[in-house]
Amino acid sequence: MAGLPEDYTQIKTLGDLLEINYKIVGAKEQLRQNLISKMETNDIRYPEIIGFEEDVIPALDRAILACHDIMLVGQIGQAKTKIAQAISKNLLSPIPVIKGSITNDSPMDLPKDELISLLEDKDNPMSVPKFYIDSNSMDKIRDNKLDTEIEWIEGQQRYKYVLATPDISVKDLVGQIDAIKITKKGVEMYQIESYSPGQLMQAKHGLFCIDELPVLDTRKQVALLSVLQEGRFTTGSYPVIFEPKIAFFATANPIDYTHSGKIIEPLYDRLKSHIHTHYPKSLDEEMLIIIQEAKIAKSFIPIFMLRTLARIIQNARASQEINQDKGVSVRMGIHALELLVGEAERTRALSHKILAVPRPCDIFCIGQATKFELTEMDDTVINREKILRD
């Protein structure tokens, strides 16, 4: 994988890293190089992503090869965040970080002069106030020198998921000056020791995914804009530059995505690739997703029961009585299968000490997994049950 020494598990200290002259590869370049490697060997690039082979996956390939930040647009339950997770897990290389760091601090983040100053216990005032590694990581290098312990962090550990909700603050994203740290350590307000990292810096060298971006208010979107525009940001009046060095993914529902003003135009423009997802197009794809994702006890699922369930979900997506702008999530089928197995256990398997086998008579139990909205009639529980039975 990109930037990964062959015997990397044997490299356990800062001295070991310097001995091999290790250079860290940026997150976007890791994605690009590892994708190229998998394409050359015809390896699976996005495990567990089903039904996107003809459109979404080629679009993802193009965007990653172009080192783009990506917007995934689709209705609920179309695997948008699962795609981001799969990419971080399979296309990011492990990197060496100082053990215990919460901001994925690699010693190689430091400029040469600053690293030498830390190793020699010298003061080296920064010409530009810039966050390279946090103060705890600096202390570890000062105390342990070349024996400073490092650990290799996988790509999925550098994946940060943030759901855009009204209670998310700018400080949650970019970090803040921590009054408690100032009091405990007796440091100056604007020294690096006073900073508590936000979500962006906790994703350093990884993949940052913000779910439902249009829900984020304008001020918070502006905080993300400088990351996309310049790869850096500042926080409030704190005179320090931060570089999270991330691959940036965002998701949006089509209704919010097309609503003017929901995403500020500069941010909309700098998310370079906009990729539209969709629901499974075939019955087989729907069945594969349901059986892959369902968390069920040991059981036997007759294929006709799985096919019946998948057909109900696909019929719901074709129904005029159901609000198709909101969509019918694949999770309805997944949760429905879990309920079918639970019903088989409740009514037969547990009392007779046999394997749970769902039957057609169990099918009406899936009503409690119904997750759609009605358009033609009042959206009540009774009306939903009627539509489901039809």
Image (tube, rainbow, N blue to C red):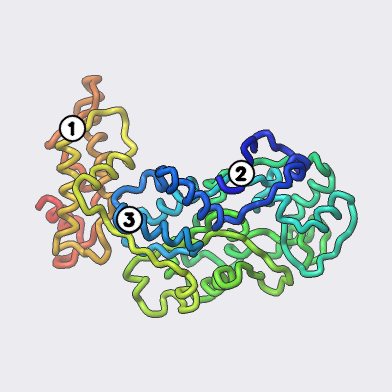
Relative to 119, is 274 on the left or the right?
A: left
Mark 2: which secondary structure? loop
- On the image, the x and y values in percent for residue 326 come to 27, 64
Q: Earlier in the sequence, mark 2 or mark 1?
A: 2
Q: Disc 3 marks which amino acid?
A: Gln
Q: Can residue 203 be seen in this view?
A: no
Q: Nearer the viewer, mark 2 or mark 3?
A: 2
- Dot 1 crowding, Cα within 10 Å, few <14, some 14–19, many 20+: few
Q: Residue lying farthest left?
A: 390
Marks 2/3: CA–CA distance: 33 Å
- On the image, the x and y values in percent for residue 348 come to 19, 26
- Dot 3 crowding, Cα within 10 Å, few <14, some 14–19, many 20+: many
Residue toward you, 25 or 226:
25
Q: Earlier in the sequence, mark 3 or mark 1?
A: 3
Residue drawn where x is 34% and y is 58% of the image: 56
Label placed on residue 302: 1
Q: Can residue 165 be seen in this view?
A: yes
Q: Disc 2 marks which amino acid?
A: Leu
Relative to 106, is 114 on the left or the right?
A: right
Tally the numbered discs: 3
Mark 1: which secondary structure? loop
- On the image, the x and y values in percent for residue 369 come to 26, 48
Residue drawn where x is 20% and y is 29% of the image: 357
Q: Image quadrant of residue 224?
A: bottom right
Q: Disc 1 marks which amino acid?
A: Pro
Query: Is residue 163 placed above or below 137 in the rendered structure?
Result: below
Mark 3: which secondary structure? loop
